[in-house]
Structure formats: structure tokens, C-alpha cells
Image (cartoon, rainbow, N blue to C red):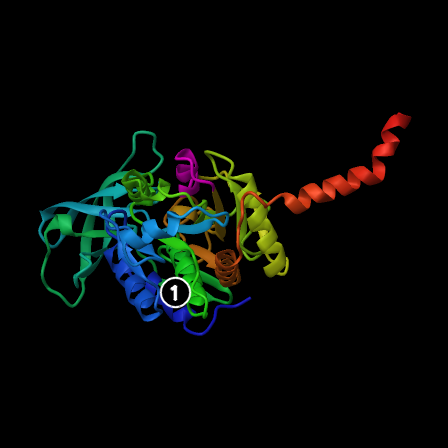
């Protein structure tokens, strides 16, 4: 399974944009431009999450308002990746105090290369120094960036305008079917949902589905919590089902190169069984066996957040190497175990994920009817064999 014409260009555009928690504007700009060209309606909610599949809050509400038996799929992927914010210049243009947001490696951090951007033209390279870990030593708390090389702009923006993350040979590169990048979680999920939307909106029949490209997931689902607090997703009589897209740490039976993973649950919860039954049937019918199913309990995702607020949810994971740049699998450009390393995925898994989301958007889901065929199979089995019960 491969990506279609134009999708590779979209993927590289997304991966080349800088992002960090609360600093997702450059990625969002790419999404808005390509969705607009593809005729996919979209708008921003009051906190800057990008909603696709409706052109306004009123259209969003109108899609969910009427009673009906067929559920509206709501795809969710986040636009950020763990990274840092500038706090203050210790030496303007040369030494930047930073604060880290989200997960991070904890070994061999001194001298680790980083990039710095203000999202508006200033680009710089530097290295980490004076790193302080969190109280539990599970990530980076604060550090200093020694700026070693500035881009074409000679200016030094205000420290609080700057953000960044780990730097490698390039923002992304390929080796066979393997794609390496400084940030894949969750830019690959963002790409997957966007590409699937473009496919389904290119057809004659416009789909009844929504997507939420969320902000600041890496600090505890902050953008999606804000969206839930608006109350929009809970209003209306039509059933709805969330499909959360993530790049998730590969685990046994959820291996890189063997297809997208239908996520049965995460570290916090198991997902909706009726929605999982629907998603499994869609995978069986459309992915030629190139998919996996597993409880992905290496971390938590936004599906559990929506379940906690009463919205049925499932998850799809693209198996990921070097989760949160932690050097778990090591490999190319890695600084070692639990040290800064590029994340990586297999492009065949990504293409399978796009196809999976496309088919979910096109396949009706009626929660009240999902188990009808299975119940009939049980009934027929009982009719054939119930007479044997009296012979025990």
C-alpha cells in the first residue's frame, strides 16, 4: 500500500514545519491551505484548534443536531510534538534559557543539537547545556540553549517568541520505506487525517464526518480539553464516534512495517467495544490483512479523554520508533539509549492508516445495528447444537 500522488508532498510540507506544544501555527497554516484547495470546509474554534468537515460552529452543530441512527465519525489528531519555549535571553542572541514541554529523553543531553524558531522567519541552531531534569527524572524541566548558528535573519526575537526541539541531519529523510524525522508524533497522525479527508471530499458524495486537529496534546490534552469544555461535541441527538490518530511506541504485536494498529485501548482505558467491532470490520474488508490490533498501553491518548466525557471512541496508531526522541530503538543519528534520537515510521503503515481513515469515513456506522449479524450467527449456532445440552 502506497501514498497517492500529491500526498507525499503534503507529508513533507507538514514534517518540515516547526512545532511544539502551544506553538502549532506553522503546521496549522499548511493544513488550512491544503484543505482549502481540496474544498474541505474548516474553521478554528475559540482556542485555535482546527476543525474540518464544517465551515463554522453553526455547521458543526447542524451536523450533530438531528436525530438519526448513523454515527458521525470525528477524527482527532494533534499538531504538536514535545519541545521547548524560550524564557529569557541570558546573553541576547547567544544564550537562551528554555522550559521544556512534554516527554523527552534524559541521557546524553549536554551538547545535544537543537533548532530554534519564532515561526515567523527567525531560524537558529544550537546545543543544550545546563539541563535540569524533572523531579522524577522522567524528562527535561529547564535548560540553556547555546545558539551557534543563525539563519538568514540577523535579528534576535524576544525570548518568549521562540520555541524549538531536537535537531538532526534534516527535518526528515527516507531510507527505503522507513521515514525518519525530528518530529513524527503526532504530525504523522495529522497528515493521515488530512490526507483521508482530501480523498473523501474529492468524491461526488460529500461525507458526514468531522476532524479536530488539536493543540498542546503533549502537555495533557490541553487543546482537546478546551474543545470539550465548549460543549459542542456533546450537543445534538445524532450518535458520534471519535477516531483518534496517533503515532505510538511500537510494542510486541504492534510492530513497525506490519500495518496500522487498531488500538483497543491505552494506558488509561479500553475503548468502545461497539465502535471497535465496526472499525475491525472496516479493516478486514479494506486493508488486505495489513493491519494489527492491540491494547497500546505504552501511553495515553485523546480517545480516553473523550471516553471520560461520554463520547464513544477508538484509536488508530502508526507504530513509532524512538518515541518522543528517546532512543528506544536507536538507529540513524541516535545519541544512544534514552538519548536524543530521530523518530521513525514505515511509510507502508502510514499509507495503510490513510486508507483505514478513508474507509471509516465512507462506511456507515449504526451503533444500534452493529451486533445484529453477530447475534444472528450466535442464534444459528445455538439452533444447530442446543439439543446436545440435554446429554451432559
x 35%, y 56%: residue: 182
Q: Position of residue 173 (x, y in %)?
A: 40, 65
- Closest to the observer: 11 or 234? 234
x 50%, y 58%: residue: 353
Residue 169 can be seen in this image: no
Q: Position of residue 271 (x, y in %)?
A: 51, 39
Residue 62 can be seen in this image: yes
- Closest to the observer: 331 or 38? 38
Does 61 sit left or right of 366 as displayed? left
- Closest to the observer: 155 or 392? 392
Does 358 sit left or right of 309 as displayed? right
Does 332 sit left or right of 48 as displayed? right
Pointer 1 residue: 11
Stretch of the chain drawn in magenta: 300-312
Give the residue furthest to the right: 391
Give the residue furthest to the front: 67
Q: Position of residue 311 (x, y in %)?
A: 43, 39
Image quadrant where residue 44 sits = bottom left
x 41%, y 73%: residue: 6
Q: Residues within 10 Å of mark 1 (few under 14, many from 20)?
A: some
Q: Secondary structure at mark 1?
A: helix
The quadrant in which the N terminus is found is bottom right
Amino acid at each position: 500500500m502506497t501514498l497517492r500522488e500529491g500526498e507525499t508532498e503534503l507529508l513533507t510540507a507538514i514534517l518540515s514545519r516547526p512545532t511544539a506544544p502551544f506553538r502549532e501555527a506553522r503546521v496549522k497554516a499548511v493544513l488550512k491551505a491544503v484543505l482549502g484547495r481540496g474544498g474541505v470546509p474548516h474553521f478554528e474554534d475559540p482556542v485555535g484548534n482546527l476543525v474540518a468537515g464544517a465551515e463554522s460552529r453553526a455547521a458543526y452543530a447542524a451536523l450533530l443536531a438531528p436525530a438519526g441512527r448513523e454515527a458521525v465519525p470525528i477524527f482527532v489528531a494533534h499538531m504538536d510534538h514535545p519541545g521547548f519555549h524560550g524564557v529569557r535571553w541570558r546573553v541576547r542572541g547567544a544564550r537562551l534559557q528554555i522550559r521544556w514541554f512534554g516527554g523527552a529523553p534524559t541521557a546524553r543531553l549536554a551538547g545535544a543539537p537543537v533548532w530554534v524558531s519564532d515561526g515567523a522567519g527567525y531560524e537558529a541552531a544550537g546545543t543544550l547545556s545546563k539541563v535540569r531534569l524533572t523531579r522524577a527524572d522522567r524528562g527535561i524541566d529547564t535548560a540553556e540553549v547555546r545558539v551557534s548558528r543563525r539563519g538568514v535573519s540577523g535579528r534576535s526575537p524576544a525570548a518568549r517568541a521562540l520555541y524549538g526541539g531536537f535537531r538532526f541531519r534534516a527535518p526528515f529523510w527516507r531510507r527505503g520505506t522507513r521515514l525518519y524525522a525530528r518530529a513524527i508524533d503526532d504530525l504523522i497522525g495529522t497528515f493521515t487525517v488530512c490526507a483521508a479527508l482530501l480523498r473523501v471530499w474529492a468524491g461526488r458524495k460529500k461525507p458526514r464526518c468531522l476532524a479536530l486537529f488539536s493543540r498542546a496534546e503533549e502537555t495533557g490534552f490541553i487543546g482537546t480539553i478546551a474543545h470539550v469544555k465548549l460543549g459542542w461535541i456533546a450537543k445534538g441527538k445524532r450518535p458520534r464516534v471519535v477516531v483518534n490518530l496517533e503515532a505510538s511506541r511500537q510494542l510486541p504485536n504492534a510492530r513497525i512495517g506490519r500495518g496500522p494498529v487498531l488500538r483497543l485501548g491505552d494506558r488509561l482505558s479500553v475503548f468502545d467495544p461497539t465502535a471497535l467491532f465496526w472499525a475491525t470490520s472496516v479493516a478486514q474488508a479494506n486493508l488486505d490483512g495489513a493491519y494489527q490490533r492491540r491494547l497500546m498501553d505504552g501511553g495515553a491518548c485523546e480517545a480516553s479523554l473523550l471516553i471520560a466525557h461520554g463520547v464513544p471512541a477508538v484509536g488508530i496508531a502508526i507504530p513509532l520508533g524512538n518515541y518522543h526522541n528517546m532512543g528506544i530503538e536507536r538507529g540513524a543519528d541516535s545519541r544512544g539509549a534514552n538519548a536524543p534520537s530521530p523518530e521513525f515510521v514505515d511509510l507502508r503503515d502510514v499509507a495503510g492508516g490513510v486508507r483505514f481513515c478513508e474507509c471509516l469515513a465512507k462506511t456507515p456506522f449504526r451503533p444500534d445495528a452493529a451486533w445484529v449479524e453477530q447475534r444472528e450467527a450466535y442464534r444459528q449456532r445455538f439452533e444447530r447444537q442446543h439439543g446436545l445440552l440435554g446429554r451432559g
